[in-house]
């Protein structure tokens, strides 16, 4: 699942502010588009690696 937040013109994050947002929400996968939208994606699922011999 992906959610996109359009913050402009209400809020504009600097690179440092976006970095702090990511650090404060490490359980989320966050990206920022060139237009300033924040994309929140589902957390990555860990795969169980099993060896087959």
Image (cartoon, grey):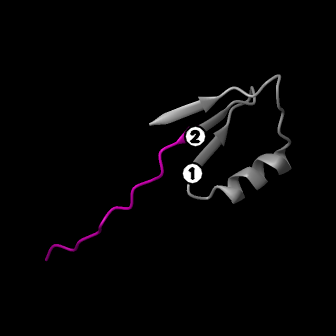
Residue bounds of the magenta highlight: 40-53
- Which disc number belongs to residue 40? 2
* Most common SS among magenta residues: loop
Label 1 Cα neighbours within 10 Å, binned few <14 / some 14-19 / many ≥20 = some
Q: Position of residue 32 (x, y in %)?
A: 69, 37
**Residue at position x 69%, y 53% from top?**
22
Q: Farthest left residue? A: 53
**Residue at position x 77%, y 55% from top?**
20
Q: Farthest bottom residue? A: 53
Label 2 Cα neighbours within 10 Å, binned few <14 / some 14-19 / many ≥20 = some
Q: Position of residue 3 (x, y in %)?
A: 54, 33
Q: Given contact means CB atoms under 8 Å apart, are the residues at marks 2 and 1 in contact?
A: yes
- Looking at the rendered structure, the secondary structure element under dot 2 is strand
Which residue is labeled 1 in the image?
A: 28
- Left or right: residue 24 compared with residue 44: right
- Left or right: residue 3 compared with residue 18: left
């Amino acid at each position: 699942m992906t959610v996109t937040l359009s913050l402009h013109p209400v809020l504009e994050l600097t690179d440092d502010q976006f970095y702090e947002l990511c650090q404060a929400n490490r359980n989320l996968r966050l990206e920022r588009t060139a237009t300033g939208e924040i994309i929140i994606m589902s957390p990555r699922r860990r795969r169980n690696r099993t060896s087959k011999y």
